[in-house]
Every structure is written in structure tokens, then in C-alpha cells.
Amino acid sequence: MKVLLDTDIGSDIDDAVCLAYLLAQPDCDLLGITTVSGEPVRRAAMASALCHVAGKDIPILPGAADPLLATQRQPHAPQADKLAHWPHKTRFPTGQAVEFLRTTIRAHPGEVTLLTIGPLTNIALLFSIDPEIPHLLQQLVMMCGVFTNRRAGVGQLEWNALLDPHATAIVYRAPASIHRSVGLDVTTQVALPADEVRRRFQHPLLRPVLDFAEVWFERQDRIVFHDPLAAAAIFDASVCAFTRGRVEVELQSARLGGLTAWTPDPAGPHEVALEVDADRFFAHYFATVEKYPAAA
């Protein structure tokens, strides 16, 4: 399956965990990686470090650093401080990420899965510049939103959606043939404590991820596999169960900008994950990575 990955690797550690999975997945033809949010070049370098360990030369392009209109809430990529430990590229094409996505999708009409695991700035720009692109995708899969959990009658906010709410709204309005979201409703059910991560992340492909994770563990005591779950759902249909409906994005409220409101509708344009088999996911994830013949 041809995949394009758009990521804010370097903030939450699960982006790196996700990229390791995609590099190891034998059914994934990773056509390219674009980065988004503050310090996109440092994020690209982190992706390069993982590709180097995997022995793969994949196009990596830094994308938008700032949201379309909202205030920047993620200006830095703190895990990139570990880059000195891992060989990586230091030069990347700049100002070309959106055009790279556009030309790659147009070169493979109906064949590309676009997987987004960060704020949707690059994708909103892509869909705005070339409105035909959503129709040319095989599917759009996003780690974004929260669809059923509510507190005091108000839906929860999700980080990717709120970082650039205007971009989120643009992308959810786009008429992709398959438009799937894996949100916090299910991703929070797949987590491992730090000690177990340290024990299980011993495959060569996961060693740089574990090194990056030590920055994450300075403030967190576990990893929630938000992004890897979205990726795994592409290749194992039994990991998540999706329900069709309609998603609307809040833009009027400054406090709730980026809120995703979902209404069940059998004819709706969006599919959201409402169920997850956590045991199957972890078995699938580690079996995939541990079979990969990366050099030590």
C-alpha cells in the first residue's frame, strides 16, 4: 500500500513509534514523509534518523512551521535534542512539502493513503491549493479528534485538532472517498508504562525511538500509542471498528477552537473509530517491528 506520512515527530513520542512501525511494515510502500509544526527541519532530521536505522532512503520534506491563523502552541521539537546520538541527514528541500504531496498523489491516482498524525496545516494547504486531491486519494486516515467522550456536556479537545483549528475544519470538509479518524476515544486505551517500553523497545529500529522517549519520560510516565494505532488500522482491519457519521469542527469559540463534534449518520462522509482491540494492536505492532531485519 502506498502511504504518505505527515507528522509532527519530536513533540509527543508516539510519532516516532508510528514511523518505526511504517518502516517495518512489509505491506507499506512509504512514498514520503512531510513534517509540520514548530522546527520542521529538526523534525525532518528525526525522521531521517529512523530511516537511516531502517536502511531506507525515503524523501523527507519539512513543511509548515506555524498554524494557518491560530497562535503557535508547539514551537519546538524537544526530542530532537537526542539527534547527536544518531546518524541523520541535515539538509532537506524547503518550501516544497505541499507540492511534493500534490505531485506524488497525482502520480498515483486512487492508490495513495495519506496518513496524518500531526496538526493539519500541510494538508489544509494541499487541499486548498489543489481541491481535486481529496478525490484522488485511496483514503485519508488521521489521528485526530475525539468523538464520544464528554465532560460537563462539552466535548474534549484533541491536540492535533486544536493546534490548527482552521486547518482541521478545512480537512474535515474535504470530500475524500474514505475519510477515517482515529481519535482519543480509542487511542487512550493503548498505552504502556515507561518501564515496559524500556523493556520491549530493544529491536534496533526502536533504539532511537527509546532514546527520543527518554526526553518524553522526563515529564510523562507512559507512552500512549495514539499515532501507531491509526497506522496499524490501515494494515489490520481488526484493530479498530469504524462507524460512519458526520464531523463538524468548532471555529467560533476561542476556548473550544478545534473541537470535533460527531453525529452518527449511516450516509455521513466520515468514519470514526469507536472500538479498539488493544491486545490485538500490541501483538500486531511488536510482531511487525520485531520481524524487521534492521542492522544493529
Image (cartoon, rainbow, N blue to C red):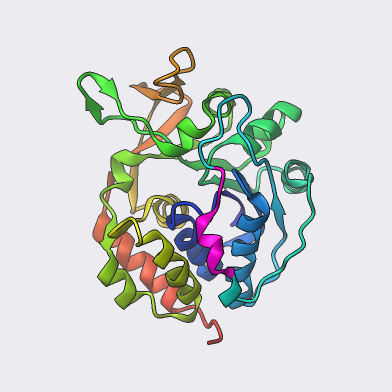
- Residue 267 on the magenta segment: no
Outermost residue toward the top in this view = 252
Q: Position of residue 70 (x, y in %)?
A: 56, 26
Residue 132 position by quadrant? top right
**Tag count:** 0
Q: Is residue 281 left or right of residue 76?
A: left
**Which is more toward the observer, 69 or 154?**
69
Q: Residue at x 55, y 64 (%)?
A: 81
Q: Residue at x 60, y 32 (%)?
A: 67
Look at the image and give the residue range highlighted in magenta.
75-83
Outermost residue toward the left in this view = 152
Q: Position of residue 223 (x, y in %)?
A: 33, 58
Q: Position of residue 7 (x, y in %)?
A: 56, 50
Q: Residue at x 54, y 39 (%)?
A: 119
**Which is more toward the observer, 296 or 1?**
296
Residue 142 shows in the view = yes
Q: Position of residue 162 (x, y in %)?
A: 46, 31
**Which is more toward the observer, 262 or 242?**
262
Outermost residue toward the bottom in this view = 296
Residue 131 shows in the view = no
Please identify the quadrant where the N terminus is shown.
Answer: bottom right
Q: Residue at x 24, y 61 (%)?
A: 279
| Secondary structure mainly formed by the magenta segment | helix
Residue 217 position by quadrant? bottom left
